[in-house]
């Protein structure tokens, strides 16, 4: 079972290793993590009031699937279409352009890669 933590990220002596320290513990309980799994919160919630994070996969009311992504060149979060009968796969929209009442988080790219197929 995968457990996702909300925590602080620290580097140790300038080395490119990332550690998490859960908010309920001290540095003695730090864990080395894969930096590729670090995701940022978008600040939005789905229809169930669940926070949407970077690399989450969501489904809209029409059955289309999107991945929440960060676009460095635009300095914003966006949706990238990953499965649809209507839209082009890879098409991108501003994260704020979708009515949130029809969006539901169904997984993420790490735990549910099958949703990308």
Image (cartoon, rainbow, N blue to C red):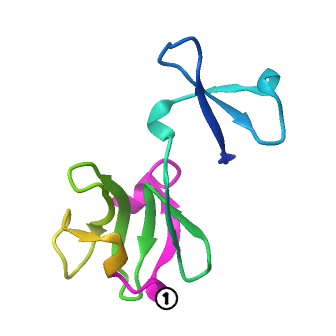
Q: Residue at x 43, y 54 (%)?
A: 55
Q: Residue at x 37, y 82 (%)?
A: 63
The image shows residue 71 at horizontal and vertical percentages of 27, 53
Residue 102 counted in the magenta span? yes
Answer few, some or many: residues within 10 Å of disc 1's Cα (few below 14, many 20 plus, some between 14 and 19): few
Q: Residue at x 45, y 87 (%)?
A: 102
**As drawn, 60 above or below 83:** below
> Which of the 4 image quarters holds residue 51?
bottom right
Residue 115 counted in the magenta span? yes
Magenta part of the protein: which range? 98-117
Residue 115 vs residue 26, the one in the foreground:
26
Q: On the image, numbered disc 1 is attached to which residue?
A: 101
The image shows residue 64 at horizontal and vertical percentages of 33, 78
The image shows residue 89 at horizontal and vertical percentages of 20, 66
Residue 72 vs residue 32, the one in the foreground:
72
Q: Residue at x 31, y 80 (%)?
A: 97
> Which of the 4 image quarters holds residue 30?
top right
The image shows residue 45 at horizontal and vertical percentages of 54, 74
Report helix, strand or loop for mark 1.
helix
């Amino acid at each position: 079972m995968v457990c996702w933590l909300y925590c602080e990220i620290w580097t140790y002596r300038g080395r490119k290793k990332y550690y998490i320290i859960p908010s309920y513990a001290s540095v003695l309980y730090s864990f080395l993590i894969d930096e590729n799994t670090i995701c940022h919160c978008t600040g939005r919630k789905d229809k169930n009031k669940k926070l949407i994070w970077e690399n989450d996969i969501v489904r809209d009311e029409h059955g289309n699937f999107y991945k929440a992504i960060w676009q460095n060149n635009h300095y914003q979060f966006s949706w990238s279409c990953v499965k649809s009968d209507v839209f082009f796969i890879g098409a991108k929209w501003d994260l704020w352009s979708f009515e949130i009442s029809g969006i539901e988080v169904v997984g993420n790219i790490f735990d549910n890669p099958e949703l990308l197929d």
